[in-house]
Image: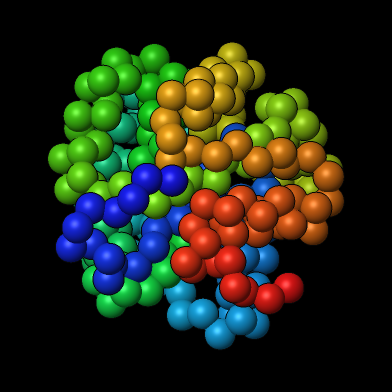
Amino acid sequence: MTERPEGESTRGRFVVLEGVEGAGKSTQARMLGEWLEACGVPFTLTREPGGTEVGEAIRNVVQDRPELSIRPETELLLYLAARTAFVKEVALPVLERGELLIADRFSLSTYAYQGYGRGLDLEEVRRMDRFASGGLAPDIYLVLDLPVEEGRARQKAAGKRDDRLEGSGEEFLDAVGRGYRELAATDGSIRLIDALGTPLDVHTRVREVLRLELPETFANLGD
């Protein structure tokens, strides 16, 4: 990972879990939180969109209302509105306290889902996201890398009902998966983590990457 700019040494670290549907982000976020708590590390675990009243309300509209027909541009703007609230109300206060922030999704999801998945111009998506996020970027993205069909099989086995995004079709979901891999190939803040195997297998890989990439925060944490 790159060195921090001068003056940012006291800012907390920002770690984001990403991946296709069924990759296990929520499970890994929970396991990561349990590890940090056992080690006595102050942290905040949250999700995006969400983490704020506005964000949760937007999440309900844009994801949990599959009957709604929402144009890609509208979808993008809704997610970015939620992001602005998340950054101002959750992310910046935690980071300015010098604490660790763990989020289930952030800007990379927008690039993968609305850029690659919905076919919106990626550079325009990036530009709008920079405005919404105030330029805030995670220290590292951990992308749980899983074939789309495997993720869908996991969701089906768990009896999970599709939300609006998951019900957008296989072509859309395949494009999202491809987007994550292509973005990882060009962005040094992204690390792909093999999401096949048991949750504990994947959690072990997550720990290894964090210890390697953010040693000042994670290297000395016990097992």
Task: Residue 120: tell me if it is visible.
Answer: yes
Who's the residue at 17% across and 48% down the image?
A: 134
**Residue 72 found in image quarter:** top left
Q: Is residue 160 above or below residue 33?
A: above
Left or right: 48, with 185 as reference point? left
Q: Nearer the viewer, residue 157 or 215?
A: 215
Left or right: 185, with 23 as reference point? left
- Residue 219 lies, in percent from the top left, at 58, 66
Q: Nearer the viewer, residue 8 or 172?
A: 8
Task: Residue 109: tell me if it is visible.
Answer: no
Q: Is residue 174 above or below residue 222?
A: above
Who's the residue at 46% across and 74% down the image?
A: 43
- Residue 181 lies, in percent from the top left, at 56, 25
Q: How many marks?
A: 0
Q: Is residue 139 above or below residue 166?
A: below
Colour scheme of the picture: rainbow
Who's the residue at 80% across and 53% down the image?
A: 201
**Residue 126 found in image quarter:** top left
- Residue 23 lies, in percent from the top left, at 67, 41
Who's the residue at 39% across and 51% down the image?
A: 139
**Residue 211 found in image quarter:** bottom right
Quarter of the picture containing the C terminus is bottom right
Left or right: 86, with 111 as reference point? left
Left or right: 28, with 127 as reference point? right
Q: Nearer the viewer, residue 60 or 79?
A: 79
